[in-house]
Amino acid sequence: SGKNVVQTEKDLKRLFPEEHWNRLHLQIIYYGREHCTARGCDGRSCEICRTCYPDRKHPKKTRKA
């Protein structure tokens, strides 16, 4: 569901075999750096976000910490 870090980790561990966890972890980090940051998700240009949020018409607005 992605509601929090713990739940996201559990979801991903259910989806991927343990032998892929370390490589996948790095791939997710690099993807976020290059294409879609967590705080600046456009939702329209990122392939993953377009799949997860097909109805999003505008970038997600976030508050600065």
Image: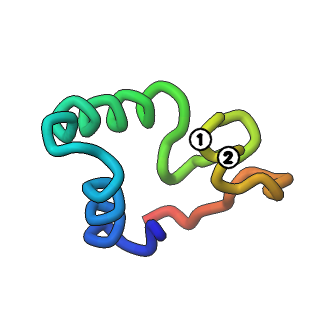
Category of crowding for the residue at label 1, using alpha-carbon neighbours closer than 10 angstroms: few (below 14), some (14–19), many (at least 20)? few
Splitting the image into 4 quarters, where does residue 28 fall? top left
Splitting the image into 4 quarters, where does residue 35 fall? top right
Q: Residue at x 36, y 28 (%)?
A: 30
Q: Residue at x 85, y 53 (%)?
A: 57
Find residue 52 and report its horizontal and vertical position in percent: 64, 53
Q: Is residue 8 above or below residue 31?
A: below
Find residue 9 and report its horizontal and vertical position in percent: 27, 60
The colour scheme used to paint the residues is rainbow
Q: Amino acid at mark 2?
A: Thr
Splitting the image into 4 quarters, where does residue 10 fall? bottom left
Q: Tell me if 46 is positioned left or right of 14 in this view.
A: right
Q: Tell me if 64 is positioned left or right of 7 in this view.
A: right
Q: Tell me if 28 is positioned left or right of 54 in this view.
A: left
Q: Which residue is mark 1?
A: 48
Q: Residue at x 76, y 41 (%)?
A: 44
Find residue 18 and report its horizontal and vertical position in percent: 15, 44
Q: Which residue is mark 2?
A: 51
Category of crowding for the residue at label 2, using alpha-carbon neighbours closer than 10 angstroms: few (below 14), some (14–19), many (at least 20)? few
Q: Tell me if 44 is positioned left or right of 65 in this view.
A: right
Q: Residue at x 56, y 66 (%)?
A: 63
- Quarter of the image with the C terminus in it: bottom left
Q: Amino acid at mark 1?
A: Ile
